[in-house]
Image (tube, helix red, strand yellow):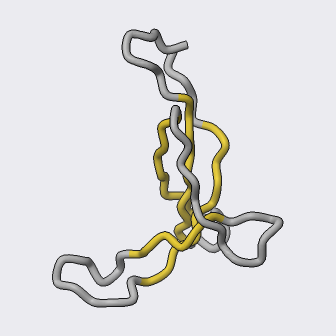
Amino acid sequence: MPRPYGDPVEIVTAPIPAQSPFIPLDAKIVVGAVAPASPDPIPIVLLPGFEYRMREWRHPTTHEIHWRLERRKSSQPGEPDE
């Protein structure tokens, strides 16, 4: 069975500060992650030995789009998934 993703964290995004023909107008940059202990978004630290993915999440009431970062332990080459 594949390893599940866990430890979801909400990602704070902001509009792109500069315009470019290669970046869509509605694109966002990652500012950091939400943390109860900090009034400002904190930097995201990616740890070795883990795989990460970002998922779009829509708030059920406001329908605003939020992003969640999920991680799971990486499987080593030749190691079966648990």
At x 55%, y 29%, the residue is: 73
Question: Between residues 60 and 65, which one lies in front from this camera angle?
Answer: 65
At x 56%, y 40%, the residue is: 71
Q: Is residue 78 left or right of residue 6?
A: left
Residue 73 vs 20, above or below: the answer is above
At x 56%, y 62%, the residue is: 58
Residue 67 vs 25, above or below: the answer is above
Q: Is residue 23 left or right of residue 82?
A: left
Residue located farthest toward the bottom when viewing the structure as drawn? 18
Residue located farthest toward the left when viewing the structure as drawn? 21
Residue 9 in the image: state x and y as whole percent. Answer: 64, 54
Question: Between residues 26 and 22, which one lies in front from this camera angle?
Answer: 22
Question: Between residues 22 and 62, which one lies in front from this camera angle?
Answer: 22
Q: Is residue 62 left or right of residue 67?
A: right
Count of numbered circles on the image: 0
Residue 7 in the image: state x and y as whole percent. Answer: 67, 43
At x 45%, y 11%, the residue is: 79
Question: Between residues 31 and 15, which one lies in front from this camera angle?
Answer: 31
Residue located farthest toward the front when viewing the structure as drawn? 48
Residue 22 vs 68, above or below: the answer is below
